[in-house]
Image: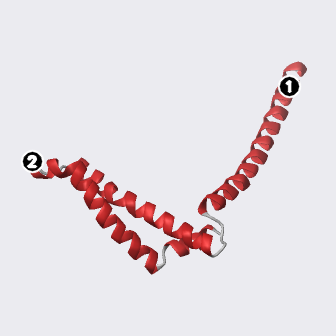
Amino acid sequence: MINEWLKIALQKNILTRAIKVALVVGSILMLINYGDVILSNGLQIKEFIKITLTYLVPYCVSTYSSTEAVCAAENKPSINQLIWELLKKKGCELAHCSKTVFNLFIIRLQQIKNNNQNT
């Protein structure tokens, strides 16, 4: 199901919209946050990474909101619902695994206790 959500997120119209939003919003934020650094002493790798993230955040927000709108319009589950279901499933598997390991640990402790009593 998550693959279906990603397929929607990668549709050309959603990608195009997200890129446009990232360029406009990212540029505004970049100028606000790093304009003085660019004009004064140039960029170091640290600033370059932060500027890249400044563009990545609006891209992700736009992609998320557009994809969620399509899912809602097509009566498909949101990514939040899909992740919650996945976590519940994996959580149950993890709980079962933990119970098994705990039981094996108890059995091993009993074996050690019995061996100590026999010697």
* Residue drawn at point x = 26 percent, y = 61 percent: 27
Q: Amino acid at mark 1?
A: Asn
Out of 39 and 108, give the one closest to the viewer: 39
* Residue drawn at point x = 28 percent, y = 54 percent: 29
Q: Position of residue 74 (x, y in %)?
A: 63, 76
* Residue drawn at point x = 86 percent, y = 25 percent: 115
Q: Is residue 119 above or below residue 35?
A: above
Q: How is the image coloured?
A: secondary structure
**Image quadrant in which the C terminus is located:** top right
Q: Which mark is residue 40?
A: 2
Q: Is residue 18 visible?
A: yes
Q: Which mark is residue 29?
A: none
Out of 89 and 54, give the one closest to the viewer: 54
Q: Is residue 99 above or below residue 72?
A: above
Determine the secondary structure under disc 1: helix
Quadrant of res 1: bottom right
Out of 82 and 73, give the one closest to the viewer: 73
